[in-house]
Image: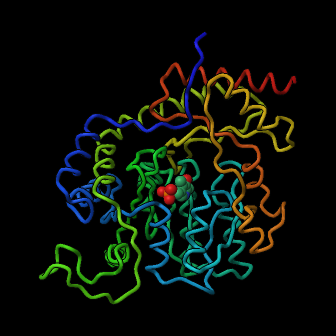
Amino acid sequence: MTAANIPFGKPILAEDAFSAVRSVLESGILVHGKVTEAFEDAFAARIGVEHAVAVSSCTAGLHLVHFARGIGPGDTVAVPAMTHVATAHAVELAGARPLFIDVEAGTGNMDASLLAKAVEDGAKPAAIMPVHYLGLPCDMDAVNVVASDVGAYVLEDCALAVDATYNGRKAGGLGLAGAFSFYPVKHMTAIEGGMVTTDDGDLAAAIRKRRAFSYNRALGERTRPGIYDVDALGYNYRMSEVEAAVGLSQLSHLDDFQEARARNDAILREGLSDIPELTIFPDSNAQARSSHYCFNIVLPRDGSIPRDAVVDFLKARGVGTSVHYPSAVPMFEYYRSKYGYTPGQFPVAEWLGEQTISLPVAPHVSESDARYIADCVDDAIKTVKRG
Ligand SMILES: *Cc1c(COP(=O)(O)O)cnc(C)c1O
């Protein structure tokens, strides 16, 4: 058998991306241009929201929403304990404090009943950040009920949720705003980059301004070149025209990408459903449909099947894996030492941090690759358990 070599992620850049980048470079207009505007319009249409604002990353977008809403010291923001550290960092960057909520053992999403309980116990989050874990939308009805009870705004972290739906509406349009990531191995890439989506025109305008130093006049609005005033603090969180060109190209192939992800997910789901040692999360429920970012298997809580051994076995067979995410966020050194969290406070998030493995389903994975991955996982569990 020829050795397989299936990485966890690999961006697929079609010829039209190369030509689009070339024309941007030849145009000499590298930021503040029409390509970024076109990307924003196309992305807003795809998600079904009024406004999309391109930024330099998802993290920048999350931070910018909090910054524009003026939260800061003294405020708390509810964040799931299992997510990319960026979700919590966006809160810290704004000067506020994350209120970590453990996640559901059946989905990995923020447990809305624990969120409600935290509020009953006196927490008053200024904002709530649901994260659609691996692409399956959170229980947004429950989150929105808590949010309106406490007057919090809802900022969705949609980094892994492009095209995910909840009650037929797309993630990114289910709260005040959403933020997407175009990091190379997400659903689609813009090299780096992010997009904030919202139906709130005032918020969109505030973010648009604050992503570029809070100039009072955008480049095209200046009557004399170089002349502007600045009436607020702002960042440089812009997306470049080159990145937007790549993003636009990716958007035109996104239907194919999503189809491949769904197909590969179904093959892995079918191939691995009979292995009793594995916990596998559903990719849909009565309200939600996943965007199939990756296929996670979760090993037993008792540690009887060590993750490292499974990952090494798969690596030896040429199957790349990843981990989403390598620790419950409160157990990362920065948060642990700052706030004094101790192991056991977020049992489900800690279990996932220690025992989850992400298998690839992205479009670089062919049908036969997906079957091969399922077979290798089956072998790995049998071998590691026996060993
Ligand atoms: C990747 C990721 C981010 C960070 O995205 P960037 O564009 O790299 O800033 C944020 N949240 C989640 C859930 C992610 O998976």
Give x and y (percent) for residue 112: 65, 64
Q: Residue placed at 18% from the left, 50% from the top?
A: 26
338 lies above or below 111? below
Q: How is the image coloured?
A: rainbow
Q: Quadrant of residue 203?
A: bottom left
Q: Residue placed at 28% from the left, 57% from the top?
A: 241
Q: Is residue 2 visible?
A: yes
Say left or right for 350 vs 325.
Answer: right
Question: 68 or 56, which is in the foreground?
Answer: 56
Give x and y (percent) for residue 31: 27, 63
Question: 144 or 45, which is in the foreground?
Answer: 45
Say left or right for 265 vs 174.
Answer: right
Report the label total.
0
Give x and y (percent) for residue 180: 44, 57
Say left or right for 79 vs 299.
Answer: left
The quarter in which the C terminus is drawn is top right
Outermost residue, left side: 223
Q: Residue placed at 74% from the left, 74% from the top?
A: 338
Q: Is residue 158 visible?
A: no
Give x and y (percent) for residue 67: 47, 78
